Image (cartoon, rainbow, N blue to C red):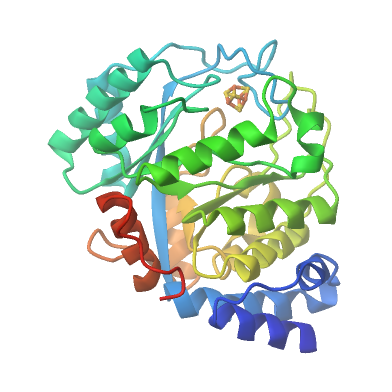
Amino acid sequence: MELLNTLVAKGLSRELPTREEALAVLATSDDELLDVVAAAGRVRRRWFGRRVKLNYLVNLKSGLCPEDCSYCSQRLGSTTGILRYSWLKPDQAADAASAGVAGGAKRVCLVASGRGPTDGDVRRVSETVAAIRERHADVEVCACLGLLSDGQAERLREAGVDAYNHNLNTAEATYGDICTTHGFDDRVDTVRRARSAGLSSCSGLIAGMGERDEDLVDVVFRLRELDADSVPVNFLIPFEGTPLAKRWDLTPQRCLRILAMVRFVCPDVEVRIAGGREVHLRSMQPLALHLANSVFLGDYLTSEGQAGRADLEMIADAGFEVEGADDRTLPPHRADLVAVRRRGAGTEVAPNA
Ligand code: SF4
C-alpha cells in the first residue's frame, strides 16, 4: 500500500504524517491489518529494536476522588467495588516497588487518585521516593498525582522523580463529555509544568469512550505537539458503577490500528500499552508488541492484569526481549533532550539536532 510506504518513510525520519494519513490507518480493513502492523513494526524496530520496557504501578492512594472523570472507577460517586485507602506509607510503597523490580520492571509509577496533590502530599511522595531509592538506586520513578500547581513539579524533580504522568485522555473538543470538574487545558498545563521543570513527560490517551476517529487523531497530534517522551495507550475498561459501564466499542483489530496510528504519529517515543490490554487485545497481545515498546507488568490500578510471569513468557514467545537496567529506553537524540531538560532551562538543543 502506498499509504504504508509513505508512513514508514516518515516514521523512519521522524516526519509528522498528515491528519489524513493518520485517519487512513484507522480506516484500514481487516484484510490490510497485518500489513499495517508490519509497517508500523518497522518504525518501532528502527527506534527501539526488539526491546520491551516493563513498568510497574504502585497505587499510593485509591478511590476517594472528588473529580468526575466518567471512565474512572475512583471518581466521585463511583459504585465500583474497588479498594479505597488513603496513602500507603513509604515502606509499604517501597515493598510494592521491590516486587515490581524483582519482576523485571525498569520504571515504577507512583499513582495517587485525586484532583491534584497538596504540598503535604508532595512531601509524602518525596519520602516515598527516598525509601524506594534506598533499595533501588537506579530504578526510574514516575509520579502520577493529578494536576500540579506552582513549584510542585520542581519539588518532585528535586526529590528524585524522573518523570511525570498526566494523560490528555481524549480530544479537546470532546473533553467536556467525559469530565466536568476540570478541563483539557488544565491537563495540558500540567504536562507543560512537568516538562519545564525538567521531568520527562508521560502523557497518553484512553480509546473506546465513544470518540470518533478524528478525536483520536486530534489527541495523538496534541501529544506529539507537547513532545511527550512516553505515550501510554489505554483501552477503556468499562467498570460497572461508572457512566461508561456499558461501552464495549473496541475490538482487538481496532486496538491494533490505534496503536499503529500512535506509532506513526509519535515514532520515536515510548509507546506503552496500558490499561485494558488483556480485555481488549486478548489473544492479539503479541502482535501489539510489534507496535508498542513498553507495557505494564502485572496489575493495573483497580483491575487485575495477567500475571507477570505470563507477560514475560508472551514477550519471549513473540521474539522480543525485556529491556535491561543498563539499556537506554529512548533513542539517543531523545534521551539527550531529556537529560538536557533535567539539567536546566537554557541548555536545550534544537529538537531535530
Ligand atoms: S482525577 Fe484521576 S482519580 Fe479522580 S476521577 Fe479523574 S482519573 Fe479518576
Q: Looking at this view, is 43 or 296 the one in front?
A: 43
Please, is residue 90 above or below residue 257 in the view?
above
Q: Is residue 108 above or below residue 119?
A: below
On screen, 242 above or below 162?
A: above
Q: Residue at x 24, y 38 (%)?
A: 160
All told, the count of numbered labels is 0
Asked if residue 230 shows in the view, the reply is: yes
**For this view, does 322 lie left or right of residue 129?**
right
Q: Nearer the viewer, residue 338 or 233?
A: 338
> In the displayed structure, does residue 68 sit left or right of residue 272?
right
Picture quarter with ligand 1: top right
Measured from the top left, where is residue 140 in percent x and y? 30, 47
Residue in the image at 43% along x and 11% along y = 86
Residue 1 can be seen in this image: no
> Residue 339: x, y in percent?
29, 58
Give coordinates of residue 150: x percent, y percent: 42, 26
How far across and how far down the image is residue 87, in percent?
38, 15
When the figure is inspected, residue 123 is found, relative to residue 28, above or below; the finding is above
Question: Between residues 212 and 245, which one lies in front from this camera angle?
Answer: 212
Give me the residue at 64% from left, 71% from top.
264
Looking at the figure, which quarter contains the N terminus?
A: bottom right
Relative horizontal placement of residue 34, taking residue 309 as reference (left or right): right
Residue found 27% across the figure and 21% down from its top: 92
Quadrant for the C terminus in the image: bottom left
